[in-house]
Amino acid sequence: MQRRDITTEAVTRQVEAMGCDVFEVGVFDAEAERMLIKTWDKETVLRSVPYLKHQNMQGNHIYIRPHGEHGLTLVDDLTAQAVKQMERDGFTPAVLTETSPRNFQAWVKHSGTEKLPTAISTEAARELATRYGGDPGSADWRHFGRLAGFTNCKDKHRQPNGLFPFVRLHGASGQVYGHAAEFIALSAVFSGVKDIRAAMDTAQRHLARGVRTILFVDEIHRFNKSQQDALLPYTESGLVTFIGATTENPSFEVNAALLSRAQVYVLKSLGDDELRLLLTRAQRKALPQLRFDEAAQAALVGHADGDARRLLNLLEQCAAAAQAAQVEAIDAQFVDSALTVNSRRFDKGGDHFYDQISALHKSVRGSHPDAALYWLTRMLDGGADPRYLARRIVRMAWEDIGLADPRAMQIANDAALTYERLGSPEGELALGQAVIYLAIAAKSNAGYTAYNAARAFVKQDKSREVPVHLRNAPTQLMKELGHGHAYRYAHDEPHGYAAGERYLPEGMAEPGWYQPVPRGLESKIADKLAFLRGLDAEADSDTH
């Protein structure tokens, strides 16, 4: 009977303990900085040991990881003390390898699940790496670990005799760590009240054996009110720790009762530096054959627009185009030719939509034509309805320019009518011109403020009678009752103004709601009102 060699024995123990059916085995050529990745089942991995040994003898590194999503977490660059502490804490590695003298890699297997969502798996890796002094840079669900039984060919580990250390298998128990909570994931798109109750039944069973449950609901805004209400009693009782994710504003899309029992965390878009780091990492691990120059990287980051998922999709598009064109050097011109049309973040009715219309309005109010044009074109580029923008532009003219420049209302209305006649894209120029004019026009919200003050007063005030001298008198009876008596016809008065006449209800003081600003036409309006008030004062003095 032929004895199995030590390397095959180590590989067998490792893949069995990892408990996966399909693996990705990586052969990394350090000199060429290129990774060859093979997707094999367990049997193929074992049959390929001679091939892998040959590659290793050529100075290539041999790596392994589960294929696709999985229930394992890799913690890299651990000390022996850190491994002992992990075991004391209950995180006994399913597989433990010494990759270089006194340096360890640990595969930790999660109980209760064969596959973890990638975000959760990565977060678990980061948590363990941070807690036990491992390498946070390798804390990613896609990270490779070294395959036991082969040599670590890094130059820094070369021994005085010229040999490299073996990757030694210290443990391969397949141990599942005992953890404090089980994880249940629901999608609000596909789940209903029945699924929520089933999840709670599962959580009850977990609790019966002393294990808490984390309930993660993706797209929580897709749950209706009754479905969200179904979560309340379980959240209040502490049966589950509830985590919800949404792309919408929770103030509008999540029930107030549920929201009040949660802590809201706002996730920001990635910055350019973060996207560049992600690009470098993805290129090194998944696309080592491609070389992106600075301009190409800048183009990809710009197209990604703060979205990591979009960046990875763009990289895949570039890789497919590069393979078809049989090129390895990627420049900005190649990126622009390979990618689909860029689309900026815009959600047509969500927070981004209202944030941008707010920015447009405030740029006009702040008399900054370039900023106003930027936000207008951003929204048009994102797919906003030009008719909606036209209505908002008319609103700006009445609210923020007002009587300081009455031409603004005319131009805004004409722009809206022009768009209706021409459509897109020609009609959008009229909207742009209107926005420029509104931004540079004299500003006044005096009319807007006066109108709102009047409305607020009327809403809370009593029903006051119309003064008799202001009442209509179309019949003889009404004239006999005094309607219209002593009314002074303004056109027959000096300056066309009935000085001292009262037009407000009896007992109501002059409110002074309209206070024209000293800008544009309203400066002349202020002068006119001051003149008329002077006539009123003279008339009052004559009567006393």
Image: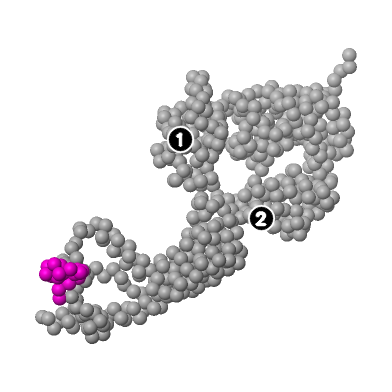
- The residue that label 2 is drawn on is 342
Q: Please rate how many residues cluster around mark 1, counting C-alpha atoms within 10 Å: few if below 14, some from 14 to 19, many from 20.
A: many
Q: Which mark is residue 219?
A: none
Q: Hey, what amino acid is under mark 2?
A: Asn
Q: Residue at x 86, y 18 (%)?
A: 3
Q: Is residue 55 left or right of residue 452?
A: right
Which residue is found at the position 74% from the left and 43% from the top? 285
Say how many tags the image has: 2
- Say whether residue 316 is left or right of residue 369: right
| Disc 1 to disc 2, C-alpha distance | 36 Å
Mark closest to the chain's N terminus, 1 or 2: 1
Pinpoint residue 82: horizontal percent, then vertical percent: 63, 33
Residue 193 pos. (x, y %): 48, 29
Decide if residue 80 is in sight here: no
Q: How is the image coloured?
A: one colour
Q: Secondary structure at mark 1?
A: helix
**Furthest-bottom residue in view?**
494
Q: Is residue 477 magenta?
A: yes
Main secondary structure along the magenta-highlighted residues? loop
- Residue 544: within the magenta? no
Q: Quadrant of the N terminus?
A: top right
Q: Is residue 24 visible?
A: yes
- Front in this rendered view, residue 542 or 385: 385
Range covered by the magenta-colored residues: 470-486
- What residue is drawn where x is 51% and y is 25%? 198
Kind of element beneath mark 2:
loop
Do callouts 1 and 2 mark residues in contact (Cβ within 8 Å)?
A: no
Q: Residue at x 84, y 50 (%)?
A: 326
Locate the C terminus and report the quarter of the image it occupies: bottom left
Q: Which mark is residue 228?
A: 1
Tell me residue 186's x, y (percent): 55, 32
